[in-house]
């Protein structure tokens, strides 16, 4: 039987990414994403939303890029897979959680809202360029 483990989320960072390195030098960035979902209307007819708080982890150069350019509140689109982790806390209690392992992401802030260093690194084609399709 075929399986699929793919997650696409668009939301805002709930905290600054935390960047650390393994002893072998692999970068790991951990951060949270808040995602709002409409869930109907209240008794007065006003729209209601549910906010989900999801932990995410990125590795390698992707992790370094996220940690360098994104801060708390920044909008982000992530693509990845769902992972289930379990561990034992300091009190000996067994803990667990689902998290997203990020395979790809996109900046969602407008060019004006990005810092000048980020904007200068992003090349955009001019309108006069021929597009090969």
Image (cartoon, helix red, strand yellow):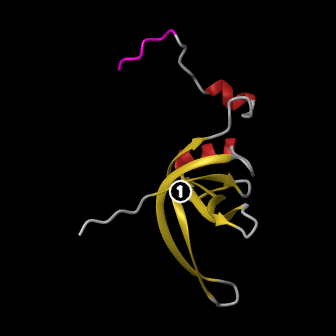
Residue extent of the magenta highlight: 128-133
Give coordinates of residue 39: x percent, y percent. 62, 65
* Left/right of residue 86 with respect to residue 131 in the rendered view: right
Could you say whether the residue bearing mark 1 is in a helix, strand or loop? loop
Instruction: Please indicate, yes or no, whether residue 83 appears anywhere in the rendered image.
Output: yes
Give coordinates of residue 55: x percent, y percent. 62, 64
User: Residue placed at 74% from the left, 57% from the top?
Assistant: 15
* Left/right of residue 11 with respect to residue 99 in the rendered view: right
12 or 119, nearer to the observer: 12
Return the residue found at the far front.
44
Return the residue found at the far left.
1
Give coordinates of residue 27: x percent, y percent. 58, 52
* 78 drawn magenta: no
Mark 1 packing: few (<14 Cα in 10 Å), some, or many (20+)?
few
100 or 50, nearer to the observer: 50
User: Residue placed at 68% from the left, 33% from the top?
Assistant: 110
User: Residue placed at 62% from the left, 47% from the top?
Assistant: 76
- Tell me which corner region of the image, top left, top right, bottom left or bottom right, holds residue 31: bottom right
* 130 drawn magenta: yes
Q: Which residue is mark 1?
A: 24
């Amino acid at each position: 039987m075929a399986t699929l483990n793919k997650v696409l989320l668009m939301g805002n960072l709930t905290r600054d990414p935390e960047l650390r390195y393994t002893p072998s030098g692999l970068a790991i960035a951990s951060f949270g994403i808040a995602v709002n979902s409409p869930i109907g209307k209240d008794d007065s007819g006003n729209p209601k939303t549910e906010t989900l708080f999801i932990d995410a982890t990125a590795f390698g150069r992707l992790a370094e890029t996220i940690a360098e350019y994104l801060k708390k509140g920044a909008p982000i689109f992530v693509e990845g897979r769902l992972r289930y982790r379990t561990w034992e806390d300091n009190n000996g209690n067994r803990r667990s959680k689902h998290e997203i392992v990020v395979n790809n992401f996109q900046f969602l802030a407008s060019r004006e809202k990005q810092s000048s260093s980020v904007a200068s690194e992003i090349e955009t084609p001019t309108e006069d360029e021929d597009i090969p399709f």
